[in-house]
Image (spheres, grey):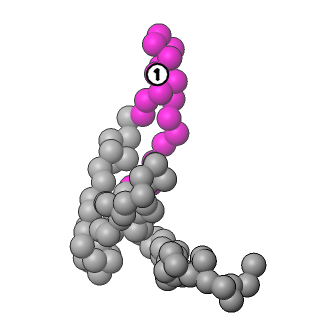
Amino acid sequence: MDARIYLPAKNAMQSGRANTRKWVLEMEPAAAKRLDPLMGWTGSADTDQQVVLRFETLDEAVAFAKRKGLTYEVYEPHMRDLKIQAYADKFRWDRVR
């Protein structure tokens, strides 16, 4: 079984950063999803995909994967560069446009 460990990105529909501080361990899909012929719903017999574990630190997530014998891949987050600027700086007389 393969697992992926990552730090989730913030929700694009919100300005807050809730649920982005904990590391997530998810299982990779073991089989392709199939289409139900009667209802047209998409389904799978792989229930491991439904399990999402959250950890406070990356070390805890890696230790859990090793303890359970999972092969895992860690996806490092892209940190954003903050440009701290005061609102009043937009109206400075010596501002370069």
Left or right: residue 37 compared with residue 71 = right
Q: How many residues crowd mark 1 within 10 Å: few (<14), some (14–19), many (20+)?
A: few
Quadrant of residue 61 in the image? Answer: bottom left
Q: Which residue is mark 1?
A: 41
Question: Taking the image as drawn, is residue 5 in sight?
Answer: no
For the point 36% across and 63% down, which residue is it? Answer: 17
Outermost front residue: 93
For the point 31% across and 60% down, which residue is it? Answer: 19
Question: Taking the image as drawn, is residue 13 in sight?
Answer: yes
The C terminus sits in image quarter:
bottom right
Q: Is residue 40 above or below residue 68?
A: above
Secondary structure predominantly adopted by residues drawn in magenta = loop
Q: Is residue 21 above or below residue 92?
A: above
For the point 51% across and 29% down, which residue is it? Answer: 34
| Image: magenta residue range | 27-44
Image location (x, y in percent) of residue 40: 50, 17
Tag 1: residue type?
Trp
Outermost bottom residue: 94
